[in-house]
Image (tube, rainbow, N blue to C red):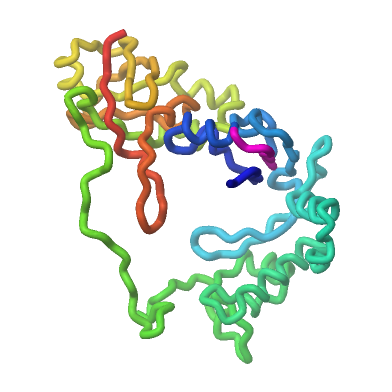
Amino acid sequence: TVKAIWFVATNPSHSWIDQNEINRVLDKLEFLVVQDMYCTTETAKRAHLVLPAAGWGEKEGCFINSERRIGYSPKVRRAPGHALADFHIFRLIAHYWGCEEMFRGWQTPEAVFRVLQRCTECQPCDITGIEGHAQVRKLGGIQWPAARMTNDEWRMTNERRLFADGKFFTPDKRAKFVFDAPEAPPEQCSEEFPLILMTGRGTSAQWHTETRTGKSAVLAKMMPEELMLDLNPEDAAKLGIRDGMRVRVISKRAELTVLTRLTSCVKPGEVYLPMHDARVNQLTHASFDPHSRQPSYKHSAVRVEAK
């Protein structure tokens, strides 16, 4: 029933688990929009409409990092070509969709920050006490919570840990743990697929789907020229595979041709591929945590054959 999707700064055609299936879903859409700095991503190439977005330093606004710190990023140069800040793209879309009145408060990036502040009022992440962009710049960032108060309690220190007092954001102030009894991974090894494929970082020169790092000639010198499969020497001996040999990695969903790298960094019974290569997620099994919906990139049954 979903007929259109609008992706902002993400590349699921590369990164999503069981890649072939997600791409079949995207190809069924009547309208796919990608808003990104680059029109070269795998997802952008499938899009009906690409909205060129400004990058860091080409737009101003606030961001919140993983330590709850709200920081300010200034605009230092104009975006190239037709690229616009996300803020301006959203305003223009609202205008042409005829719902501009709903966004009447979006006059500047700082005005949008004020809207965000109102949304946080009386919430655990309350930031209504922040005076604006100027204060964020002056203090070098501000951690939430930073609620509106009659004193400067939250400004006493700029390095604060949540729950240091043992009180949590629950009615009885006690932590609630979400857990299930351990279960076996949905896709188990078998006689046909006796190895477990794990995926993760490749080298320090690569990042996620290589939207930017893949374009650097300097970084390219720091990574293997071909996709490398890490294989334990014990498994290699059983399979008659030598270091550097070209092999096929096969799952129920797809197969890839790669070069082997024999290493004890992976245990017997396991193999490892870097997630940065656009082909790797063709192999992965689409299973998800029932609570967080986090996909399982770390456990897919495969076999390895000499080519």
Name the residue located 38 percent from the left edge and 77 percent from the top edge: 164
Query: In the rendered view, would you say 164 is above or below 218?
Result: below
Whether 30 is among the magenta residues is yes
Q: In the drawing, does residue 286 fall left or right of residue 99?
A: left
Name the residue located 38 percent from the left edge and 16 percent from the top edge: 258
Q: What secondary structure predominates along the stretch shown in magenta?
A: strand
Q: Residue furthest front?
A: 1
Query: Where's the C terminus, which quadrant?
Result: top left
Whether 212 is among the magenta residues is no
* Residue situated in front as seen by the camera: 228 or 94: 94
* Residue situated in front as seen by the camera: 82 or 251: 251
How many marks the image carries: the answer is 0
> Measured from the top left, where is residue 214 in percent x and y?
56, 27
> Measured from the top left, where is residue 190 in percent x and y?
19, 29
> Measured from the top left, where is residue 45 in percent x and y?
65, 28
Q: Quadrant of residue 53?
A: top right
Q: Residue furthest bottom?
A: 150
> Measured from the top left, where is residue 209 in percent x and y?
52, 34
Query: In the rendered view, would you say 244 is above or below 24?
Result: above
Q: In the drawing, does residue 203 fall left or right of residue 147?
A: left
Query: In the rendered view, would you say 204 is above or below 259?
Result: below
Name the residue located 67 percent from the left edge and 60 percent from the top edge: 62
* Residue situated in front as seen by the camera: 141 or 170: 170
Q: In the drawing, does residue 92 fall left or right of residue 203?
A: right
Boundaries of the magenta span: 28-35
Name the residue located 59 percent from the left edge and 29 percent from the top edge: 42
